[in-house]
Image (cartoon, rainbow, N blue to C red):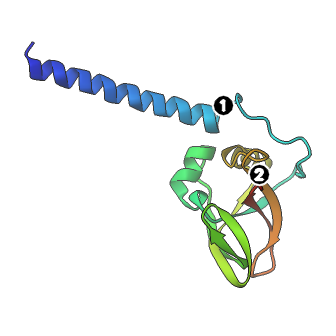
Amino acid sequence: MNTLTLWLARLLCLVGALIIGLYGWFWYTYQSPYGYTPPAAMEQSADGPHPVFVYGTLRSPWVRWLVTGERLESTPALLPGYRREGLDLEVARDDQVAGQLLAVDSETLAELDRYERLGVRYERVRLTLARGDEVWAYRLLEQ
């Protein structure tokens, strides 16, 4: 075996190990039953659908599919009285945030909560969209 072939084989093994490692991290962080405990006192009806306003990574259909394992339909929505500040929503009376509106069942809402690290990084709050719908939205917790 020549040096180039050996070098390429090692590189391929390294790339494969990185892919497997990233997949394992993603599964553990966002889908496994380990390493995350949802807050006990979160208001949630057993029935759905639950309207959820998303304004960050969850706007992407690919991210939603990776998090939930299903193809979630969304519609454009506007949230008045807020502006997007990095990963959070800040109150801004004369501004609005463009996002997407999802309608999810309780199981999918729990998957979104896990992705957003509800109670650890974000809180889920009720807000009102420009068209008057009351929805769930995620806001960063105070540090």
91 vs 59: above or below: below
- Residue at horizontal 76 percent and vertical 76 percent from the top: 129
**Place of residue 60 in the rendered image (x, y in percent of width and height, measured from the top left):** 54, 59
**Place of residue 81 in the rendered image (x, y in percent of width and height, measured from the top left):** 75, 80
Q: Label 2's element? A: loop
Sequence-wise, which precedes: disc 1 or disc 2?
A: 1
Residue 25 visible somewhere in the drawing: yes
Task: Return the residue nearer the eye: 52 or 56.
Answer: 56
Task: Return the residue nearer the eye: 110 or 49.
Answer: 110
Among all residues in the image, which is located at the extreme front? 143
Q: Is residue 31 left or right of residue 8?
A: right
Residue, disc 2 = 105
92 vs 44: above or below: below
**Place of residue 126 in the rendered image (x, y in percent of width and height, measured from the top left):** 84, 65
77 vs 123: above or below: below
Numbered circle sitting on residue 32: 1
Q: Residues within 10 Å of mark 1 (few under 14, many from 20)?
A: few
The residues bearing labels 1 and 2 have C-alpha atoms spaced at a distance of 19 Å
Q: Is residue 20 left or right of residue 94?
A: left
Among all residues in the image, which is located at the extreme top? 1
Residue type marked 2 = Asp
